Image (cartoon, rainbow, N blue to C red):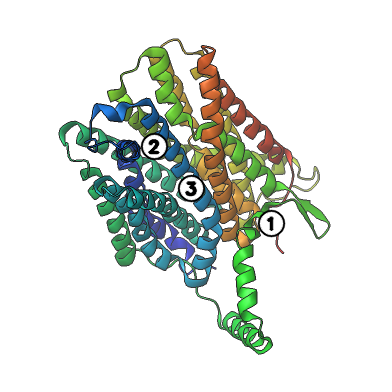
């Protein structure tokens, strides 16, 4: 049960938006600088290992050595892999800690932990000792996932306070803000790289944003998760007493900690309960994995594709990334709320019309408004339809990219893809709606784990395919492949449209 009344849910969510904005600025504003820093650190390491008399300075032509570039590419891939692994593993622990101690303590500490990653890679640039530089880079890879977990926590807060009808609207606001942060960061990065030569400036901006997010949550964000009731607290104390008497408390605690990453995944696995097979969560999770695998690498692939096929100027990369981000942001802010509002209203009127037609031919019965439970089930069902068509738009837009004959056509195709930006918030809302109410936070942790797994698998898979397609002179085939993955995701979620099932099964 949420700590805040449902009528104050909008107020609670609006307080979370500046937090999400600040958390997403940090990793994005240093993205381009991280590439330069890692290349330079690997340049120092390579020439020190070769026994060079003097260590290259930043910008030295020796850093353009092919072996140095290959080493830097491998390190960047390893850092991305570390991020994916720790992001996948940490989701259930973050969820459990926030369930036990509340959302607010983790909202405060999450951005502060992320500063470890930001500060470590900056120190690696300035410290000449190669061993220490390697330790700092590994530290960066481990703690960079704290930024994504800090953004994951507000989704748990939304599940605490939002009704079924409002949940998708709140998630869309949060998704739009999560796009506004990187979009703003790309613009800041482009301006800073053009007019400021000091490599540390983007990192100071990132550190300021992360500390600002922590301070904002400390002063302005209230706890959304209600404290356990007295009965629950008493039962927990009795359980602890029993464990201490039998001496199994420590062992059971260790066992529970080891099982934590598996527990949310058990929730999504198909299982029978009260004679019914519950498969919906598994289908939604698999659909999200396919869709995310097809789209998460697209920003990077688009820059490579525009450069390889249309000689797109590298200095325009930041503006291209800003276009991809702000087009999706504009859809979520301007059009998506209207689609939710009028789409659900139209669907509800359609159901009322169907009920009217089913009335007995004899005595005419007065047509009554559908009760709250029915309207919430209708909202959940409409979210399924919306998720399906959002993924279809992604697939069609990526197919259009593969057919483009100029970079203007590529931009037009990505503008169409912006209309599929509703997939992430609707996936979250659908996932929570199919989960038992008492396991909504576990369901979001499982969804975040699936998303992290897709982020981990997609770059090496699609990156390898892109290299193979470039060798045969068909780089555009990557986007057709990515569109096929999105199409498969839509195909997986399609059965939910036709399944006549009640939402929120109870255990």
First-in-chain label (1 vs 3): 3
First-in-chain label (2 vs 1): 1
Give coordinates of residue 206: x percent, y percent.
28, 49
Distance Cα–Cα, label 2 vs label 1: 34 Å
Q: In this view, does 406 lie above or below 78?
A: above
Residue 61 left/right relative to 295: left
The quadrant in which the N terminus is found is bottom right
What residue is pinned by disc 1?
266
- Dot 3: element: helix
Distance Cα–Cα, label 2 vs label 3: 29 Å
Quadrant housing residue 451: top right
Q: Which of marks 1 and 3 is in front?
A: 3
- Dot 1: element: helix
In this orientation, which residue lies closer to the viewer: 371 or 38?
38
First-in-chain label (2 vs 3): 3
Q: In this view, does 43 lie above or below 108?
A: above
| Crowd class of label 2 (few under 14; some 14 to 19; many from 20; radius 10 Å) | many
Check the image and name the residue furthest to the top.
405
Q: Which of marks 2 and 3 is in front?
A: 3
Q: In this view, does 387 lie above or below 410?
A: below
The quadrant in which the C terminus is found is bottom right
- Dot 2: element: helix
Residue 195 left/right relative to 339: left
Check the image and name the residue furthest to the right.
275
Q: Is residue 390 visible?
A: no
What residue is pinned by disc 3?
82
Check the image and name the residue furthest to the bottom.
245
What residue is pinned by disc 2?
329
Residue 36 left/right relative to 349: left
| Crowd class of label 1 (few under 14; some 14 to 19; many from 20; radius 10 Å) | some
């Amino acid at each position: 049960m949420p700590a805040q009344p449902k009528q104050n849910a909008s107020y609670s969510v609006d307080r979370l938006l500046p937090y999400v904005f600040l958390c997403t600025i940090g990793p994005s504003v240093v993205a381009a600088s991280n590439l330069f820093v890692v290349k330079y650190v690997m340049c120092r390491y390579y020439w020190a290992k070769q026994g060079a008399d003097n260590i290259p300075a930043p910008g030295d032509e020796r850093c353009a050595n092919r072996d140095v570039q290959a080493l830097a590419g491998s390190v960047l891939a390893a850092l991305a892999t570390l991020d994916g692994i720790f992001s996948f593993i940490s989701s259930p622990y973050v969820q459990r800690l926030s369930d036990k101690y509340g959302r607010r303590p983790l909202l405060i500490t999450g951005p502060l932990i992320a500063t470890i990653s930001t500060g470590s890679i900056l120190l690696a640039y300035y410290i000449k000792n190669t061993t220490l530089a390697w330790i700092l880079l590994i530290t960066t890879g481990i703690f960079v996932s704290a930024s994504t977990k800090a953004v994951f926590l507000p989704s748990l807060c939304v599940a605490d306070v939002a009704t079924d009808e409002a949940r998708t609207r709140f998630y869309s606001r949060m998704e739009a803000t999560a796009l506004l942060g990187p979009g703003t960061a790309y613009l800041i990065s482009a301006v800073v790289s053009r007019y400021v030569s000091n490599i540390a400036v983007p990192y100071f901006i990132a550190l300021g944003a992360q500390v600002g997010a922590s301070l904002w949550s400390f002063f302005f964000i209230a706890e959304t998760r209600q404290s356990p009731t007295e009965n629950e607290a008493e039962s927990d104390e009795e359980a602890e007493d029993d464990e201490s008497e039998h001496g199994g408390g420590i062992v059971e605690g260790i066992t529970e900690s080891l099982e934590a990453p598996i527990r949310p995944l058990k929730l999504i696995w198909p299982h029978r309960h009260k004679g019914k097979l519950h498969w919906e969560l598994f289908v939604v999770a698999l659909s999200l994995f396919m869709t995310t695998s097809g789209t998460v690498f697209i920003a990077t692939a688009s820059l490579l594709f525009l450069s390889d096929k249309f000689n797109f100027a590298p200095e325009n990369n930041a503006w291209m990334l800003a276009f991809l981000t702000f087009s999706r942001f504009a859809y979520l802010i301007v059009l998506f709320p209207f689609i939710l509002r009028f789409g659900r209203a139209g669907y509800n009127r359609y159901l009322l019309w169907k009920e009217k037609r089913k009335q007995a031919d004899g005595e005419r019965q007065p047509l009554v408004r559908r009760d709250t439970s029915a309207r919430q089930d209708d909202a959940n069902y409409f979210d399924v339809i919306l998720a399906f068509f959002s993924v279809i738009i992604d697939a069609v837009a990526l197919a259009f990219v593969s057919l483009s004959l100029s970079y203007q056509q590529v931009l037009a195709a990505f503008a169409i893809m912006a209309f599929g930006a509703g997939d992430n918030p609707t996936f979250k809302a659908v996932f929570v709606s199919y989960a038992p109410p008492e396991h909504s936070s576990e369901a979001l942790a499982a969804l975040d784990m699936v998303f992290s797994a897709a982020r981990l698998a997609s770059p090496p898979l699609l990156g390898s395919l892109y290299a193979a397609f470039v060798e045969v002179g068909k780089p555009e085939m990557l986007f057709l492949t990515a569109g096929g993955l999105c199409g498969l995701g839509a195909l997986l979620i399609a059965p939910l449209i036709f399944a006549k099932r009640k939402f929120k099964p109870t255990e």
